[in-house]
Image (cartoon, helix red, strand yellow):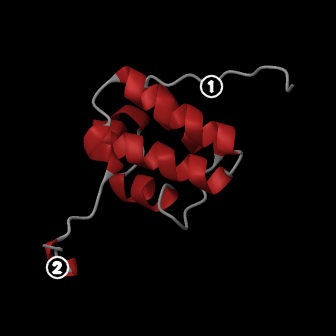
Amino acid sequence: MAKSIAELKIYDPAEDLGSAEGVAAFMADALESGDAGYVAHALGVVARAKGMSQIAKDTGLSREQLYRSFSEKGNPTLKTTLAVMKALGIELTAKAAE
């Protein structure tokens, strides 16, 4: 029997990012897309998975600022992005394009 829309649960990828390998794969996919909005959104998902309150403490930014920066319409600065990546233990590396 088919479920009604009211019975369906909204999927939150943050619930499935329990391992460093999962986070790395998720962020690698976002970075490979070349879409700045998708990268910012993915970083926000990882931050929620790790705990936005802790990320706020580690970066010195407010939770509200983090949620706003990494929302669908957010546009985080490079400084904010790098601070959050550092707090999450994510490294940004560069390689020559093929």
Q: Residue at x 44, y 57 (%)?
A: 65
Residue under numbered circle 1 = 92
Figure quadrant of the N terminus: bottom left
Label 2 sits on a secondary structure element that is: helix
Question: Could you tell me the amino acid type at mark 2?
Answer: Ala
10 Å neighbourhood of mark 1: few (<14), some, or many (≥20)? few
Residue at position x 34%, y 48% from top? 13
The location of residue 68, given as percent across then percent down, is 46, 62
Visible residue check, residue 12: yes
Residue 83 can be seen, yes or no: no
> Residue at the location (40% across, 47% down)?
45
The residue lying toward the viewer, choosing from 57 and 30, is 30
Q: Quadrant of residue 3?
A: bottom left
* Residue 90, image x, y percentages: 50, 25
Residue 92 versus residue 80 in the image, above or below? above
- Work out whether 35 lies above or below 30: below
Total marks placed: 2
Task: Give how far apart the Cα atoms at labels 1 and 2 are.
Answer: 40 Å
Q: Quadrant of the C terminus?
A: top right
Residue type highlighted by circle 1? Leu
| Residue 5 tag number | none
* Helix, strand or loop under label 1: loop
Q: Is residue 53 above or below residue 12?
A: above
Badge 2 is on which residue?
A: 6
Residue 34 horizontal side relative to residue 19, left or right: right
Tell whether label 2 touches label 1 (CB within 8 Å): no
Mark 2 neighbour class, 10 Å CA radius: few under 14, some 14 to 19, many 20 or more: few
* Front residue (pair 43, 32): 32
Q: Nearer the viewer, mark 1 or mark 2?
A: 2
The residue drawn where x is 62% and y is 25% is 92
Q: Is residue 88 left or right of residue 78?
A: left
Q: Is residue 9 left or right of residue 46?
A: left
